[in-house]
Amino acid sequence: MIGKYRFGTPFATDAIVRECALSKGALPRFRVEEKEGNVLFSYTLDKKDCVFGLGEQVRGINKRGWLYVSYNEDDPEIYESRTSLYGSHNFILVSGKETFGVFFDTAGKVTFDVGYTDSDELVVTARDVDVYLIEEESALEIVHTFRGLIGRSYIPPKWAFGFGQSKWGYKNETDIREVYEGFEKNNMPLDMIYMDIDYMQDYKDFSVNKERFPDLPALSAELKEKGVYLVPIIDAAIKEEKGYTVYEECLKGGYYCTDAQGKPYTVAVWPGESLLPDVLDPASRHWFGSQYKTLLDMGIEGFWNDMNEPAIFYSPGRLAQAIDYVASVKGQNLDTHAYNKVMGAVTSLHNSPEDYAGLHHKIGGKRVSHEKVHNLYGYNMTRGASEYFAEYAPDRRYLLFSRSSYIGAHRYGGIWTGDNGSWWSHLKLNVAQMPGMDMCGFLFTGADLGGHGWDTTEDLMLRWLAFGIFTPLMRNHATYWVRPQECYVFKNKDAFRNILGMRYSLLPYLYSEFVRAALNNRMLFKPLCFEYTQDERARTVEDQLLVGDSLMIAPVVEQNAEGRYVYLPERMKLIRMKAGDRYSESVLEKGEYYIPVALDEVVFFLREGKVLPLAKPAKNVKSLDEDHLSWIKFISEETTYDVCRDDGFTLSALEKSFMRYTLKP
């Protein structure tokens, strides 16, 4: 059952695809009050209540005990103390004495005080919001109903489920070839090489530096023939430069964000002074999406959208003020307060609330301040690209994922979790984030494996890959200044080769479960307590997940650990894989176990009554042999399993693409 309640005059976010009439009467369960222009929604939590959801956020699966703010934020310093990350996903599920879900649909900032101020109080603060209250018999059914409300999740091409290598610092064609050859020579699988901002001419969107990449179409075709796809980055800002066609079109068509008077609003990002396309305006959004044609015509079939919170390094006016202030104190003996003021004048330039307040959009024929619709920007950038892809090749699936997002963007592309660190705590965070993102419709997700910032280590990389082989988006990505972390640079190459190979062995299962979850509005990654609803111990498990219908995983997330304790909520079969087609198995009863896990192996668990299809390890998805599957079984009677055997590229083939296998004990 869904109830819809309106407070104020919210902007249409287009997060919802299933229309709901406004409900009569007051919002049930919550105490509602207005305070200083905001609406506060309060609910008293029972001592054992858990609160799930919020998509991409900090801390654990159970969100109780912290303050979370939905305000898309470009900040790579992701510590436990953060309250906002790159996406805003305003769906929560309260599970315990009462079980219900709530979606706060608003374009602006929302604060979720989940037992932070008062450990027994959930207080949500918003303004101009539609509130959807969802009541079903179980948490899984609540998620299913909510996912039906917001529409089907994006399904990328099958090759996008392979392994991808990325780094800010692959500057030219030679670097790209070296990466390909590094994997090829070491017999390590690879499906994608990502291109960061260095492929562009002067960091200009939809441009290619001809000196560094003299023939990008030929390079793309050559690698694609070998089963490897090039995936370039696209940023939000458009460089202000006369003669730059994209800028000239943007200016002439009025496709840019403005100031309060309707004049072009200049911000600075990678290329310097730039315009932001007004992707909240349908005409501007379509124009921006059509710019992808330049790269599509070169044979590119995948993109990652970045810097689309949107990130603002500075605005020219505020930069001038900061420079004037710093100059004014030249030669002075600065005490700590004066010094901090100087530093603040510079550091406050980045993503300034003042700059966001000055930025305006055209919405419904009116000029609207960006601060009121901030969380919708990255969503609509991704939407613009996806909608154009549907025009360019109506039945073709393209890879598309974004850094910034809002619920609704899940229909158009995936997301990655942003600029994480090479820290064990961020591996653990990656595990905890997966169910929340699934709940909000974002199935094609993953983190920068090994960490984006700071130096990774061989053991962290191996442990992260051992988890990453289960995540739909599997990408090793790092910034330019850290030590190399391509899999072939490490000493224990056999371990990396084997773990990467396991991804391809598991792909018939992972891909089938992903497509099934997307088509049926189900979760791919689930907390244990969503299935084992009466198991009090399962409610406390934060670092084990159910993956699809058959598997439970328990990744090792501690440095120097030679194994870990695992809770089995039922009888399960332990599978220990040393390589994609070599494994051992043993049956364990329900209970708590210490499981040794070496750095070169992956351990997971097969649920009773379930089966797991396996392929031979492959060098890429193109060469994957699914005609000769083997099976791991934990069954006592005949059962069936449907493997998705679509062509991997078209949308129309998905619904009728499953091949049924009948398995005997």
Image: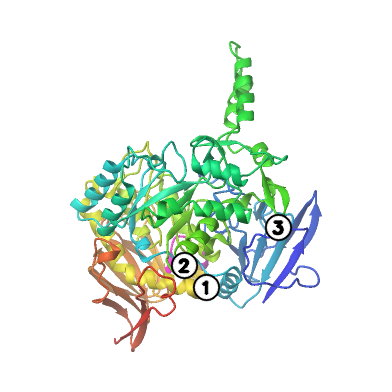
Q: Residue 435, how many percent across, how many down?
A: 50, 63
In the image, residue 641 sits, relative to residue 426, either above or below, namely: below
Mark 3: amino acid: Phe
Mark 1: amino acid: Asn
- Horizontally, residue 111 falls left or right of residue 192, namely right
First reached walking from the N terminus: tag 2 or tag 1: 2
Q: Residue 418, how many percent across, how many down?
A: 48, 49
Q: Residue 302, how many percent across, how many down?
A: 40, 56
Q: What's the mark number on residue 521? A: 1
First reached walking from the N terminus: tag 3 or tag 1: 3
In the image, residue 467 sits, relative to residue 343, either above or below, namely: below
Q: Nearer the viewer, residue 583 or 475?
A: 475
Looking at the rendering, in which quadrant would you find the N terminus?
A: bottom right
- Note whether residue 99 is visible: yes
Q: Quickly name the residue at label 2.
A: 394
Q: What's the mark number on residue 466? A: none
Q: How is the image coloured?
A: rainbow
- Horizontally, residue 3 falls left or right of residue 526, namely right
| Residues rendered magenta in the picture | 539-548
Q: What's the mark number on residue 11? A: 3
